[in-house]
Amino acid sequence: MSTDLFRQTVQYIGEYLETDVSHLRPDSRVAFAVPGLDSFKLFEMILFLEDRFDIEFDENVMEKIDTMQDFVSHIELLLSRKTQNV
Amino acid sequence: MSSPHQVCITGTGVISPLGASVPGIWERLLAGCSGIGLLRRFDASRFSCRLAAEIADADLDFADGPYAHEMKRMDRFVQYAVTAAKDAVSSSGLLPEGTCPPDGGVFIGVGTGGLPHLEAGVLLQEARGPRRVSPYLIPSLISNMAASMIALHYGFRGPQYTIAGACASGNQAIGQAVHAIRAGNLKWALAGGTEAAITPIGYSGLQAMHALSSSSEARATPRPFDQRCDGMVVGEGAAVFVLEERAHAEARGATIHAELSGYATCTGSTQITLQAADDLTRCMTLTLRDAGLDAADIDCVYAQAAGLVKGDECELEALQNVFARQAARPAVTSIKGHVGHTFAASGPLNLMASIETLRTRRIPPTLNLDTVAPQYADVDVVRETRDRDVRHCLINSFGFGGVNASLIVSRSQREQASRQSS
């Protein structure tokens, strides 16, 4: 997992929630570590990250994601697929 | 109506094209200022009407407190209602130290609801597919969210109601709150109306109805009650009031600004969107009866008149029916030339102005009025700011679907007594 990509993801999450989420670490559990992240915020945050990274998550992506490391690794995978498709 | 529970107004909050403070708006109404200008929210070049009375984003105040994240995602009609409600609550002193008294309710009139978000959601869905639509889309646009977000923001646990009666929604919402307090079911309520319909699909629909003015002169449009009127200009806004049972207000030492003494609503029109003078007459007459007043007691009328050719004429005919036999006729005014037609917020904005008229004894002018049709010469339409001692104001609002609703607001008993003794 790229450290830069992790940092970038945390920055975008903070931007979406308009709050400081710099406490997030790779082993932070997304559903619990992000303050006030209810299901609507999570779904809309996914859309926000899709726009920021120009990627498209699978429909049920969050069912497979537990930690921030899972999340960022998945983003990394989607970005690499995008690069290969170009 | 005879009730042991008289209803008074102890707080007012407004957001309008003329600003978001009651003193500022009132000063501009009296000065004949207009909040109408070239439409800026979207490219209106393809529409016959390119004017609107828009609210400045800087006047919005909804972001702090609970549900701040959700409030930012609400359509503007919700944000306007919450902005107005916050001023109403703070000016009333109803909730000291963030407390939440029991027995209150919220009644908000909404006309078109979240039309802008609905339109944007449809366009997004067609451009990028259904999965790109925000989970907040539906909660942001359903009509009840104005009342709901007010109630949730303050943590109110009483009833909340949304009244959908087109342009009469706001008057109906206030009237229903009056009924609830008179019946002894509530001690206080937040009541008012909100509207934000400046969106391309709204303009398309209104243009198809030939309801919009085609004038490009912002300072001369619309022309309420004028023989040359050619349609409305769309405005937006919200006004919310704290209504209280008199004894409740007096017990906590609240300042009573006015009393809501009459309300009636009825159905009747000649077409689905066109009022009938007989039904407007009946609505005003029923309101007078509800207040226990005669036509001669009304000193001022805040009219619906929006600059619509047939609608304005119907109202003139109805006003003539109700008041022409009186020796002292009421002064009739319309503020649509100042703020456009704000649909569900129209009656509540008129109520705000009426309270100021009772307080200051001044009546703002009907802007852009040259000539009233000669057959209605008996109706005393205010053309210049007028000084007049006003005891009771009648407020009209009439909506598509034959929804008619009028209110009467009166000087408070204490104020009345003090003026009589002086």
Image (tube, coloured by chain):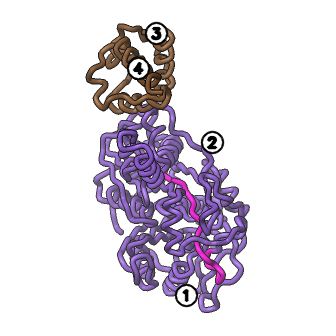
Badge 1: chain ID: B
Mark whose residue sits in front, 2 or 4: 4
The answer to whether marks 2 and 4 mark residues whose Cβ atoms lie closer than 8 Å is: no
Q: Is residue A48 above or below residue B133?
A: above
Real-space Cα separation, disc 2 to disc 1, in angstroms: 44 Å
Q: Residue placed farthest to the left in the image? A: A63
Residue with the mark numbered 3: A2
Residue with the mark numbered 4: A75
Considering the numbered disc 1 on the image, is that residue within a helix, a strand or a loop?
Answer: loop
Residue type at numbered disc 4 = Ile
Q: In the figure, is residue B209 to the left or right of B146? A: right
Checking the image for residue B324, the label placed there is 1
Residue B39, horizontal then vertical, whole percent: 64, 57
Tell me which label, 4 or 3, sits earlier in the chain.
Answer: 3
Which chain is painted in purple? B
Tell me which residue sits at (50%, 32%) in the image. Answer: B64
The answer to whether marks 3 and 1 mark residues whose Cβ atoms lie closer than 8 Å is: no
Q: Mark 4: give few (<14), some (14-19) or many (20+) Cα within 10 Å.
A: many
Q: Quadrant of the N terminus of chain B?
A: bottom left
Considering the numbered disc 4 on the image, is that residue within a helix, a strand or a loop?
Answer: helix
Q: In the figure, is residue B352 to the left or right of B399? A: right
Residue B95, horizontal then vertical, whole percent: 44, 37
Considering the numbered disc 2 on the image, is that residue within a helix, a strand or a loop?
Answer: helix
Residue type at numbered disc 3 = Ser
Give B47 or B270, whichever is nearer the viewer: B47
Residue type at numbered disc 1 = Ala
